[in-house]
Image: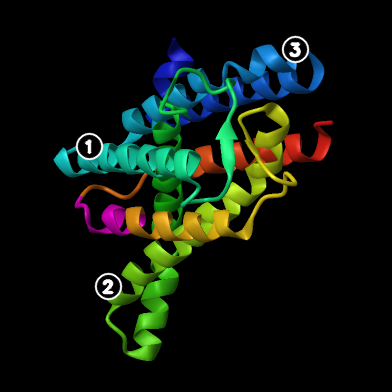
Amino acid sequence: MILLNKLSTYQIATCIAILFHAIGLTGILFFDTTFFTKATPFNLLLSAILLVWTQKEKNKYFYFFIAITCMVGFAVEVIGVNTGLLFGDYSYGKALGFQWQNVPLVIGVNWFIVLYCCGICINTFLVKIITRIAIETKTPPQVLKTLSVIADGATLAVLFDWLIEPVAVKLGYWQWHGDGSIPMYNYICWVTVSTLLLTVFHFCKFNKQNKFAVNLLLIQMMFFLLLRTFLK
């Protein structure tokens, strides 16, 4: 208890995230892959709860962003799965839990986690660079910041999707029909939807500093990178 009292909120959240991702990684690689894969919805919900817990100065704009991201993220997946108009020809497996309209309910939560973390990361690391560029080019810093958060954030989100795609297929999260290859159209749609939602992220007036969000994205990227490397 004394040690916990000395740790900050984001440090406690980071320790929890590392613990559960380490358990999941070990279980998937060395024990019962199916059992640990089915625990993914719990891990996603836990990650979302930790993000909300570590968010400073929570207000109506923050909760609006959560709601709109979850709803839009789920809606585009419903359109994609049932019509093929978005992302491509694919379908979800049973690993991500309860489904409605052939889409796991937790997928909306996943869209929130990915875009919130990407937006926070870009907002955190590029502020000083943007300020320096703005001074040198005599461009309003706010204009450069807006473009960076939206464009660079969407690029980071797509790179994250590219990282997890082969792993997700192997674990049965979803599958691509036809020859099973991941279509370029999937990434084009990811860029489009991410740009839209990160625009909402940028203009919603809530605190955009969250060290845990940065840590969580790094943890998840390392998690999927290791699975992509060693999962048979």
Q: Label 2, on which residue?
A: 142
Where, by quadrant of the figure, is residue 34 drawn? top right
What residue appears at the point 41 percent right and 78 percent down from the top-left corner?
132
Q: Label 3, on which residue?
A: 32
Task: Name the element at disc 1.
Answer: helix
Spatial CA span between label 2 and label 3: 50 Å
Kind of residue indicated by mark 1: Tyr
What residue appears at the point 58 percent right and 45 percent down from the top-left corner?
89
Q: Earlier in the sequence, mark 2 or mark 3?
A: 3
**x, y percentage for residue 73?**
38, 42
Q: Label 1, on which residue?
A: 63
Spatial CA span between label 2 and label 1: 24 Å
Q: How many marks?
A: 3
Kind of residue indicated by mark 2: Gln
Magenta residue span:
198-205
What residue appears at the point 61 percent right and 25 percent down from the top-left corner?
21
**x, y percentage for residue 208?**
31, 50
